[in-house]
Image (cartoon, rainbow, N blue to C red):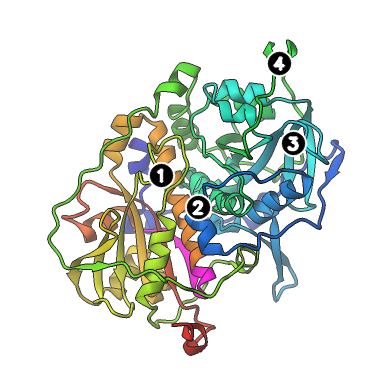
Amino acid sequence: MHYHEETKHSEVSVRSRAHFLDWENKPLQYKIYPKLAPVLLPKDFPHASQDTIDCVRGNESTGGTVDVERVAELLYLSAGITKKIRSLTGEVHAFRAAAATGALYEVEVYLVCGEIPGLSAGVYHFNPQDFELRQLRAGDYRFHLYEAAGKRGEILSVPLSLILTAIYWRNAWKYQARSYRHFFWDSGTILANLLAIAASAKLKARVILGFVDDQVNRLLGLDTRREAVTVLVPLGSEGAPSKPSTEDLLTIPEIKHEYVPLSRSEVEYSDVLKIHSASTLRSVEEVTSWSTSPPQKTRPEKRGQFYSLQPLQVHEESPLGKTIIRRGSTREFSTEGIPFNYLSTILESSTGGIPADFLRSASHTLMDIYLIASAVDKIQTGAYYYDQEERALELLKVGNFREISGYLCLEQPLGEDGSVAMFLISNLGDLLETYGNRGYRAAQLEAGIIAGKMYLCAYALGIGATGITFYDDAVTDFFSPHAAGKSCMLSVIIGFPAYRRDRQRILHQN
């Protein structure tokens, strides 16, 4: 809670900040192991042809197979480079499959697998720049991951697990101590893609936030003052558990593979190190107990008018792979209204549940969604609360709040011009009391996953979306008394991009 309070944005903190961007010292966006031989990934992998919205909603079916082509698909559509744009100055900017704060891409992806057709058992690092893997350890290390995650059986019985990490300096270069929030937002958007791809491929996926940090960091050979693991994701249909050899039971040897420095110098932010240390799990006992009793959410008294969601029953299908490749972060919105069934579809699909160890069921969530509807057909302009149990929007107050929406979003035009500004808010006090400090990671991560799902749904429907930062306390104050005592985790703006004004072409299906 101390970290959250200290890193809040306010008019005073933003205007008094002396930080500037040292472009000559901007961190390298890729982690490069120059002395490790590359393992080439195939370029002719499947591209997730199933409908985006169906995949975002989730799919419990299993039976999909995993080979090196499937691994390539998972990596490309979750964290690969999907487009390159040349600026007026001639500089080429590479953009990736999932949104990232400031396009700084501090999240790295690692792979721990058994023998997979086309890929040997081992621990690997993924470099999106050349679409290659580098093997950090040879052999099957799933047993070590299984031990670190509190002996979760699915890690031993599925063919692979992806591990996400965050490189501190790469994001802190711009966002300083607040960057710790971003590590989980950006991990979350990658996970939104990954969960959708897994659903399209009929692969079981599980988001695991409970693990002994030091053990997993050691497995990857990380310098933990610069980089640390954020989340584990076992993937694939469960089979017979792998049997550890005698060597697997021994202490894992230390590795220190050389990698290219990010920049000429780095600044270490003590608040980032402190919050990460404070939210670290240090033993299997802590792992098995930290998330056993999720908090019960208090349901506010219903007072306002309700609008039941009206999600699209039939929509023009948008293949997931094409949606991810097309997706970006909208840089300018028109002020046109969006259909209520678009908003309904986005809300229903993005909140349909996350298979995570910190959520007790598919319907459980740590988030409350509040929103400002500035231009949505069939509902009044005003502020709303999304009642997920009732699948309805509760009108909290009527009015044109465009200017307020822009102000809440750090006085940025994106927040004012979009059709809807959605704020993902959590009761942080109750959450931390139940989960301990690890709960802070859970709240930020879930917000990032939901935001990533909103992105995918918006782009599948032919509109735009962007994640955006905010004035923390001002958001709570605006939605109070309903939101009193809660804390904003993340905000997402949706609407028609300014460059697509031919609304009839997009809405013909309605």
Tell me the distance, in whole angstroms, between the alpha carbons under discs 2 and 4: 35 Å
User: Total marks drawn?
Assistant: 4
Looking at the image, residue 352 lies above or below residue 162: below
Q: Position of residue 390 (x, y in %)?
A: 25, 57
Query: Along the polypeptide, which appears first: circle 2 or circle 1?
Result: 2
Residue under the image location 37 percent in, 64 percent down: 409
Q: Amino acid at mark 3?
A: Tyr
Q: Is residue 217 magenta?
A: no
**Counting other residues with Cα less than 10 Å from the Cα at mark 1, is it few (<14), some (14-19), or many (20 or more)?**
few
Q: Amino acid at mark 1?
A: Ala
Instruction: State which quadrant residue 219 falls in.
Output: top right
Tell me the distance, in whole angstroms, between the alpha carbons under discs 3 and 4: 18 Å
Element carrying mark 4 = helix
**Counting other residues with Cα less than 10 Å from the Cα at mark 2, is it few (<14), some (14-19), or many (20 or more)?**
many
State the extent of the magenta-drawn residues as a range: 458-470
> Residue beneath label 1, please?
362
Q: Position of residue 196 (x, y in %)?
A: 56, 54
Query: Along the polypeptide, which appears first: circle 3 or circle 4?
Result: 3
Mark number, residue 58: 2
Query: Along the polypeptide, which appears first: circle 1 or circle 4?
Result: 4
Q: Is residue 415 left or right of residue 373?
A: right
Q: Is residue 283 visible?
A: no
Q: Is residue 467 magenta?
A: yes
Query: Along the polypeptide, which appears first: circle 3 or circle 2?
Result: 2
